[in-house]
Image (cartoon, rainbow, N blue to C red):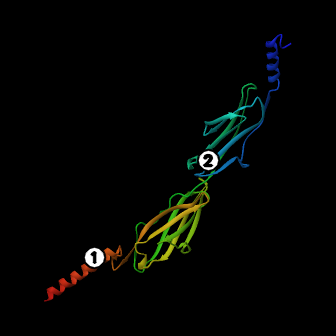
């Protein structure tokens, strides 16, 4: 019969195909938590995948981030952000399935939740100028981390973290942490000119981010800035002594 009337055969097949239209059963993001979080880590690759279960013909899917379409596909759609920056934290994500034949549109929503690196530490004093017998007491503060950052301290390449304390503060409005670390350490003349470094790190940034400055010790109102400065001071003192002696004779 098809050989005699191919156009009728074509119409029969076409009608049979559309008789099996089926709506989408379920639309979902992969790897979301119960509270619709898409977890990731600042600075690492971030993957988003949305799939539609069921649906005939395959539904057309779109992913929106902050109400802007960023990726599209049929039946499933995925996107990789390489790497994901900090400002994507808490961004809204929506997956939309459109079936124009059934005049149906479905959507599901989630949001991006990142582990955040600590921001650069800040010293409470700069420069660090100490008297000869004065104990060094200095603090470093790092904000914006999730989870809380931990501090390590170094002087002249030596780890002196055991001489420090740390305090963590949770900011509920931002869901981030501030860490303040205080170092108390007895500085000797040999430490003059050495770098003191505080380094903040967490699971998002295991290597950490550091801040450093130079230790300057003082004796009798003069700074042990460097061997050259010490020599100049010594020469100057001898010139004053010799000048005074010449006046006496």
Q: How many marks?
A: 2
Q: Earlier in the sequence, mark 2 or mark 1?
A: 2
Q: Residue furthest right?
A: 1
Q: What residue would you read off at disc 2?
A: 90
Q: Residue at x 56, y 71 (%)?
A: 165
Q: What residue would you read off at disc 1?
A: 232
Of marks 2 and 1, the one in the foreground: 1
Q: Residue at x 80, y 13 (%)?
A: 6
Vertical comparison of 73 with 142: above or below:
above
Vertical comparison of 227 with 111: above or below:
below
Name the quadrant containing residue 134.
bottom left
Tag 2's secondary structure?
Answer: loop
Q: Residue at x 60, y 51 (%)?
A: 44
Vertical comparison of 12 with 238: above or below:
above
Q: Residue at x 74, y 24 (%)?
A: 101
Location of residue 70 in the rendering, given as x and y in whole percent from the top left corner: 61, 37
Label 2 crowd bin: few (<14), some (14–19), many (20+), radius 10 Å: some
- Residues marked 2 and 1 touching at CB (< 8 Å): no
Q: Residue furthest top?
A: 4
Q: Is residue 58 left or right of residue 131?
A: right
Location of residue 144 in the rendering, given as x and y in whole percent from the top left corner: 56, 56
Of residue 57 and residue 221, the one placed in the foreground of this image is 57
Of residue 26 and residue 53, the one placed in the foreground of this image is 53
Label 1 crowd bin: few (<14), some (14–19), many (20+), radius 10 Å: few
What is the distance, in whole Å, between disc 2 and disc 1 at their CAs?
Answer: 59 Å
Location of residue 81 in the rendering, given as x and y in whole percent from the top left corner: 60, 44
């Amino acid at each position: 019969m098809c050989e005699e009337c191919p156009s009728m055969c074509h119409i029969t097949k076409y009608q049979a195909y559309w008789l099996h239209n089926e709506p989408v059963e379920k639309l979902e993001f992969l790897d979301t938590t119960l509270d619709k979080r898409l977890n990731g880590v600042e600075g690492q690759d971030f993957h988003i995948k949305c799939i539609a279960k069921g649906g005939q013909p395959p539904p057309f899917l779109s992913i929106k981030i902050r109400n802007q379409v960023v990726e599209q596909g049929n039946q499933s759609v995925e996107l990789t952000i390489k790497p994901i920056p900090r400002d994507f934290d808490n961004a809204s994500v929506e997956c939309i399935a459109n079936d124009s034949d059934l005049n149906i549109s479905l959507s599901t929503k989630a949001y991006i939740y990142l582990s955040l690196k600590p921001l650069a530490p800040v010293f409470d004093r700069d420069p660090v100028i100490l008297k000869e017998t004065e104990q060094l007491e200095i603090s470093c503060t790092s904000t914006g981390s999730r989870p809380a950052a931990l501090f390590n301290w170094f002087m002249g390449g030596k780890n002196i973290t055991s001489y420090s304390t740390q305090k963590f503060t949770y900011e509920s409005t931002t869901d981030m942490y501030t860490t303040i670390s205080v170092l108390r350490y007895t500085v000797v003349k040999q430490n003059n000119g050495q770098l003191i470094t505080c380094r903040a790190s967490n699971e998002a940034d295991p290597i950490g981010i550091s801040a450093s400055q130079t230790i300057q010790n003082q004796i009798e109102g003069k700074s042990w800035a460097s061997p050259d400065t010490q020599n100049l001071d010594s020469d100057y003192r001898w010139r004053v002594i010799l000048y005074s002696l010449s006046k006496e004779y």
